[in-house]
Image (cartoon, helix red, strand yellow):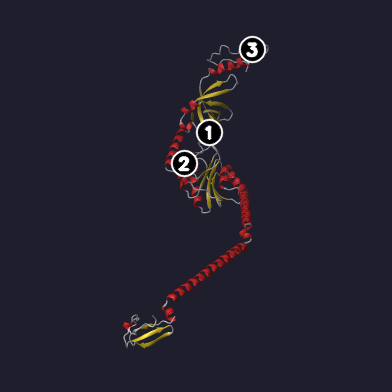
């Protein structure tokens, strides 16, 4: 742009570049040109525009995005400062690609870079305000009832025998689920029930299909899938009737509605949320190649562990076998035999000495007793006289004449009769 004409009702800047002010021989500078453009742009007021968000990037708390016209032929860039973002309603602070909004924008031109953009001062949803408010109230109610609680969600089977699929007839979602599931597990089987995925028929047909699949004993998991769409077309999957039917189902339910950024309430109530139909197929069916690789890995780990264990046990056994007690076990018996022989010999010697000492002491005692015994006295020629009462006669007066006595000598005894005392003791 080499020259500008002022818009009706606007006054051009004092230093605006005019066609008469520049020529090939006397060109104007880029800086003056940009200043002139900014001067014109700064005179434009704010304007409300409607469009679809095609970019929403948050950097440093600020948002940098783009809006696309409904026709798809026009596109503008915008920026939303963090101060303005904080003033927006809570549901407006987490917008995403595909949302339709009405924004109050004011044009801005950067002199240094020559970039043209719009600054947003206000923004709101178009046509979905009341519906979004109702959805938020329903979300809060279901959360308070515990329908979003992870503890109530059912686990998916590792390998389902039959997968129940609820989706639109001849839809891309159905093709994606079938194709990706069969690539991962070729023997996978489906029971598919087609239902309207938008409009007035969406909720009743989806509920009926869910009831039919939930009653089928062969169906192990149910997938509700459809392609992406704007929030208006996905409202059926936030219907309270459908949500309560999914929560009451005995079979695990997978929500695969829309694209990554789509988030109907069905995602919160279902037992598993898949970001896309393709993602649902990958999360419901295991990959046969991965499972085979895992089995091979586990076999290799088991083989390695078993080999290490056996090698360790063999090494320990060899170490034990090298010990003297196991290398020559008879040595232990031999040493014990020698010790037993020595102890036996010592015991025999001790017993012999004790016996000999006993015999010697017995002989000594016998000799002592013999020396002290009356029998020894009798053996020397002495005799002992007893009266009839067994009283030893120690005094001649004890045996007057005519007294019968028994005389004991060294070799026996005999009876005698006393003739009385004799005048003299023949032994004196």
Of the pair 320 and 213, the residue shown nearer to us:
320
The local crowd at label 3, few if under 14, some if 14 to 19, many if 20 or more residues have their Cα within 10 Å, is some
Q: Which residue is mark 3?
A: 22
Q: Quadrant of the C terminus?
A: bottom left
Q: Quadrant of the N terminus?
A: top right
- Where in the figure is residue 284, as x and y percent of width and height? 56, 47
Q: Secondary structure at mark 1?
A: loop
- Where in the figure is residue 373, as x and y percent of width and height? 42, 77
Residue at mark 2 to residue at mark 3: CA–CA distance = 65 Å
Q: Secondary structure at mark 3?
A: loop
- Tell me whether the residue at label 1 lies in contact with that at label 2, contact meaning CB atoms closer than 8 angstroms: no
In this rendering, would 34 be left or right of 142? Answer: right
Q: With respect to residue 423, does 219 lie above or below?
A: above
Q: With respect to residue 171, does 420 lie above or below?
A: below
The local crowd at label 2, few if under 14, some if 14 to 19, many if 20 or more residues have their Cα within 10 Å, is some
Of the pair 365 and 286, the residue shown nearer to us:
365
Q: Which residue is mark 1?
A: 96
Identified at 49% across, 28% down, the residue is 85
Identified at 64% across, 60% down, the residue is 327
Q: Which residue is mark 2?
A: 239
């Amino acid at each position: 742009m080499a020259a500008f004409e002022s818009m009706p009702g606007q006054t051009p800047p004092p230093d605006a570049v005019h066609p008469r002010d520049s020529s090939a021989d006397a060109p104007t500078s880029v800086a003056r040109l940009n200043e002139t453009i900014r001067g014109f742009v700064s005179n434009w007021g704010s304007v409300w525009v409607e469009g679809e968000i095609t970019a929403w990037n948050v950097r440093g708390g600020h948002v940098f995005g783009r809006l696309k016209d409904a026709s798809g032929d026009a596109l503008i860039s915008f920026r939303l400062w963090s101060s303005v973002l904080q003033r927006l309603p809570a549901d407006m602070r987490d917008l995403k690609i595909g949302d339709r909004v009405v924004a109050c924008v004011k044009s801005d031109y950067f002199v240094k870079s020559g970039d043209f953009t719009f600054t947003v001062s206000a923004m709101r949803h178009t046509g979905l305000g009341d519906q979004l408010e109702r959805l938020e109230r329903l979300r809060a109610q279901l959360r308070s009832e515990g329908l979003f609680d992870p503890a109530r969600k059912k686990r998916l089977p590792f390998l389902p025998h039959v997968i129940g699929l609820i989706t639109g007839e001849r839809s891309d979602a159905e093709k994606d689920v079938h194709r990706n599931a069969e690539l991962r597990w070729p023997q996978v089987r489906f029971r598919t029930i087609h239902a309207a995925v938008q409009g007035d028929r969406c909720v009743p047909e989806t509920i009926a299909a869910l009831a039919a699949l939930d009653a089928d004993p062969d169906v192990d998991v149910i997938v509700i899938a459809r392609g992406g769409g704007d929030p208006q077309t996905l409202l059926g999957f936030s219907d309270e009737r459908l949500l309560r039917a999914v929560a009451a189902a005995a079979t695990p339910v997978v929500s695969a509605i829309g694209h990554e950024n789509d988030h109907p309430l069905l995602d919160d109530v279902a037992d598993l949320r898949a970001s896309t139909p393709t993602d649902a197929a990958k999360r419901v069916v295991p990959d046969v190649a991965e499972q085979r690789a895992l089995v091979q890995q586990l076999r290799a780990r088991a083989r390695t562990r078993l080999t290490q264990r056996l090698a360790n046990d063999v090494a320990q056994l060899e170490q034990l076998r090298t010990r003297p007690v196991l290398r020559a076990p008879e040595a232990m018996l031999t040493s014990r035999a020698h010790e037993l022989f020595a102890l036996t010999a010592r015991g025999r010697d001790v017993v012999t000495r004790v016996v000999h000492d006993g015999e010697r002491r017995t002989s000594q005692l016998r000799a002592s007793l013999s020396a002290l015994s009356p029998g020894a006295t009798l053996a020397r020629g002495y005799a002992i006289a007893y009266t009839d009462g067994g009283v030893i006669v120690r005094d001649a007066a004890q045996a007057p004449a005519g007294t019968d006595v028994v005389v004991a000598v060294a070799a026996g005894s005999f009876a005698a009769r006393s003739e009385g005392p004799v005048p003299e003791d023949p032994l004196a």
